Amino acid sequence: MLVDRTPPSLSVTCPATAELDASGVDATVVASDGQSGLAENPSGSVPIPTSSLGEKTTTKTAIDNAGNETTRSCTTDVIYAFSALKPSNGKKVNAGSTPVTFRLKDALGYVTDGSATLEIAPIVGGVTGSYSPATSTTDAGDAFVAEKAGKYAYSLNSSGLAVGTTWSLRVTVNDGTTHTTSIAIKK
């Protein structure tokens, strides 16, 4: 009589990202065992919770009739839907006050309780330098202000940026995502 020492086959796959509060987001689990058969078969769809931001890990275990087991997991990052960052990439702006805006949404509508910060770095010869916190013409610090309908705004103080220079703007949202655009200071 042969003894089954081979663990079952198991795959657990998840979407890489999911929108906050989205419904119908599932991990797919497929288990099989060609030797003694499965005693515990976790195959099927497993709902992924999307009611809060952050990484959600789905872990499943398959056990065959000989007691061998396999455990696998996958992770989905629950994030906001992020609209286009403005100004558009490469936009030429006058030195002074440059508005930087975007919108955040979840599956239920616009979000006004998120947060984000802005950093700025010079681009020289196509190479982005080191980022540092941005300064505003109207607000203290580098944090965006939430407005209505999911709009977030920052009044970038670009008055100290040299004419003819190009700058990368990096937004970091509290869901862990980063978004970039660039501006060129008009001559």
Image (cartoon, grey):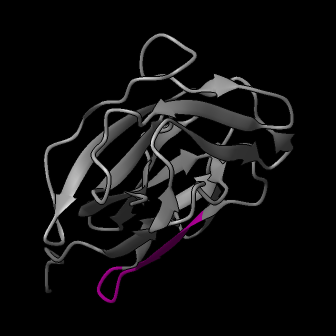
Q: Is residue 52 visible?
A: no
Q: Quadrant of residue 154?
A: top right
Q: Between residue 187 and residue 26, name the one nearer to us.
A: 187
Q: Between residue 90 and residue 95, name the one nearer to us.
A: 95
Q: Between residue 108 and residue 100, name the one nearer to us.
A: 100
Range covered by the magenta-colored residues? 27-36
The answer to whether residue 52 is magenta is no
Q: Between residue 185 and residue 37, name the one nearer to us.
A: 185
Determine the residue positioned at 44% across, 68% down.
90
The answer to whether residue 29 is magenta is yes
Q: Main secondary structure of the magenta part?
A: strand
**Lateral position of residue 160 relative to residue 90, left or right:** left
Give the vertical position of 141 relative to 83 (above or below): above
List x then y, in percent, for residue 117. 45, 30
Give the vertical position of 137 relative to 153 (above or below): above
List x then y, in percent, for residue 123. 21, 59
Q: Is residue 89 visible?
A: yes
List x then y, in percent, for residue 173. 49, 37
**Lateral position of residue 18 relative to residue 187, left or right:** right
Determine the residue positioned at 39% across, 60% down.
187
Outermost residue, front direction?
Answer: 187
